[in-house]
Image (spheres, helix red, strand yellow):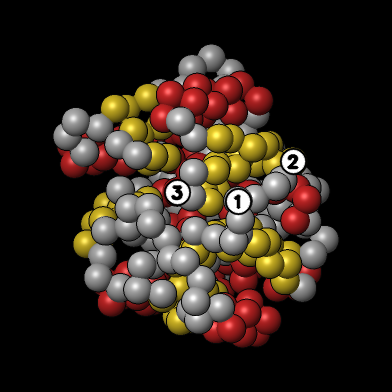
Amino acid sequence: MATVRTDQKQRVLMRAVPESFSNALASFFGSGPTDIALAKTQHAAYVQALLDCGLEVTILPADDKHPDCIFVEDQAIVIDGHVLLPVPGHPSRIAEQPPIADFLSRQLNGFQVCGMFGDARMDGGDILRLGDIFFVGLSDRTNQEGIETLRNLLSHLGHELRIINIPTEKALHLTSISSTPTDNIILTAEGYLSPEDFGELPDGCEVLVMPEEEVYGCNTIGFENGCVLVPDGYPTVIETLKQKGLTPVLLDMGQIREADGSITCCSIFF
Ligand code: GLY
């Protein structure tokens, strides 16, 4: 069986689906949500899956002025007792951050909070962790200055950072095209990234490359009990996880995908 994630996944912060969700940014996986009631139902099923995995879930109220507000992953990066509050890479998303920052700073007493300054930009969706190695996507949302801010924090914490060039003509974020369902597996898709892009990995770690048409299925969240949240409809991904001794928990992500949102986009673990 694959090694399950050891990073902290006990509490999760989410945000409710706004009535304005049909106006969310959408350029890659979808062309915009069309059914807000269905989006809410799909989001509720996701929340239930987290509760079933034993997580304590907090859901902040939606902000109708910000159609993308459910995608909290982009707004805060929690690493080993530190919270990095990036300046999100799309201007329409910057004002989503204050309620998330307020919540995390109240909850995480004693946590160090770091900001981002000047021209630095980053979406949390460009960060991927495999044990002690962090990968960051250089994308249309995350720039070199943002990466330097993250590098400073990670070097202070003793973690390595590797940069991955995102194929921005067809992908938004690093986590749009990859994930780490366990501490020794990276999932990605042909035509997007190759094992070489991740560099040499520690013994026992591997990059599993899925068919190009299953790229959306490569975004997963794994838990200590071996359950892995996976979008429904990606048979190679699902079968591959089963072969690794993991238990896929299938989520209908249709309306969230329409807003270019993947499973990890809707959660911050803290
Ligand atoms: N719709 C998610 C984003 O573009 O940030």
Image position of 31 with respect to 232: above or below = above
Which residue bears the numbered disc 3? 73
* Residue 116 seen anywhere in this rendered image of the structure: yes
Q: Are marks 2 and 1 in contact (CB under 8 Å)?
A: no
Nearer-N-terminus badge (2/3): 3
| Neighbourhood count class around disc 3 (C-alpha, 10 Å): few under 14, some 14–19, many 20 upward | many
| Mark 1 secondary-structure assignment | loop
* Residue 259 seen anywhere in this rendered image of the structure: no
Q: Quadrant of residue 85?
A: top left
What whole-number distance in Å separates the C-alpha atoms at marks 2 and 3?
20 Å
Q: Nearer the viewer, mark 2 or mark 3?
A: 2
Q: Amino acid at mark 1?
A: Pro
Give the residue at x 78% y 69%.
Answer: 212
Question: In the rendering, at what x and y percent does residue 213 appear?
Answer: 76, 73
Question: In the rendering, at what x and y percent does residue 233 appear?
Answer: 61, 82
Question: In the rendering, at what x and y percent does residue 163 appear?
Answer: 67, 37
Q: Amino acid at mark 2?
A: Asn
Which residue bears the numbered disc 1? 202
Observer-nearest of 134 and 266: 134
Q: Quadrant of residue 16?
A: bottom left
Query: Which numbered dot is residue 165?
Result: 2
Question: In the rendering, at what x and y percent does residue 51 appear?
Answer: 26, 72
